[in-house]
Amino acid sequence: MTVHDVSGKFGKTLAVLFLVAGLFLTGCSGPPDPVLGGKSPTATSTAPPKAPATATPDPIEATRPSTPAPVTDLLITATSLELRDASGTSLSTFDYFQPASELVAGLSTAFGSAPISERYEGGSEVPPGTGYIWSNILPADPKSPGPEGDFVLMDGVPSGTSPHEPNTWVKVSSSTVKGVHISTVDGISVGDDAAEIAARYPDTANPQGSRLDVFVGHVPLPPMDSLSELTFSVWLLAADPLGPITEFRSPSPNWGG
């Protein structure tokens, strides 16, 4: 009976199995797979956080000028015309000694349109010149120098000399022109009750036949020659003393009165 060396074959078989198992384990011992959506557990350094992205301004938008606020109100006094926005903020101011072209440009912007210009011959107290009319043109008044309209800027010739002879003056016959509300001292506008205003200014309310004149907002001027009580004011006119204010003019020179 032949006896086989089983232990030798079994030992060789176990050795082969251990070798294969060792190779298999060695091939699977690489770094672990990264966690989906996260960092690898074997990472040894942390990347610095990135700065948040900032929007780059559009160069065209950055250089585009802001739209100015629209003019909603025009305040007229004996010394100036002031354009204001809806909040009451002053946008620009003009005086009556500036060149007429500057006032025409500013008022054209405020009213949103250029005026109609008309030459006039003047009169005994008013030199000839050019009237710039915005909105409606009104029938000529033989008692009033120059053209008539809702708003008229009068440019007299020759140019006036400060502080007694203004280059320009205005005539206003409407409370609103091109959507801009026009007022003067104490908020007075064309259309306000003339008798009520006369009662507020009794010292300067002067009936002139069938017409009523009221002078408001007096501004004293330096003496000139032998005249010492000189003022500019705003001249309110009412065709009927018991009716509304129909027009006002500024500046109105008052020499000694």
Image (spheres, rainbow, N blue to C red):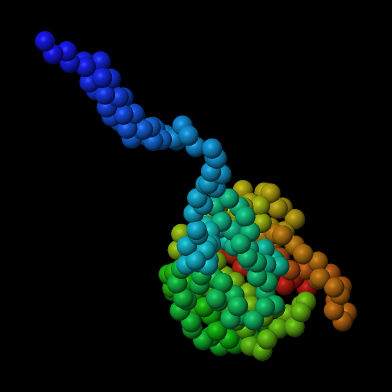
Residue pictured at 39% horizontal, 35% vertical: 30
Q: Quadrant of the C terminus?
A: bottom right
Residue placed most toward the observer, 52 or 250:
52
Residue 114, percent across and down?
Answer: 46, 76
Residue 73, percent across and down?
Answer: 55, 58
Residue 5, percent across and down?
Answer: 21, 17
Q: In this image, 221 relative to 208: left or right?
A: right
* Residue 12 showing in the rendered view: yes
Q: Quadrant of the N terminus?
A: top left
Q: Is residue 218 above or below residue 163?
A: above
* Residue 174 showing in the rendered view: no
Q: Is residue 25 above or below residue 62?
A: above
Residue placed most toward the observer, 103 or 44:
44
Tally of marks: 0
Residue pictured at 75% horizontal, 62% vertical: 218
Residue that protrudes farthest toward the top in the picture? 1
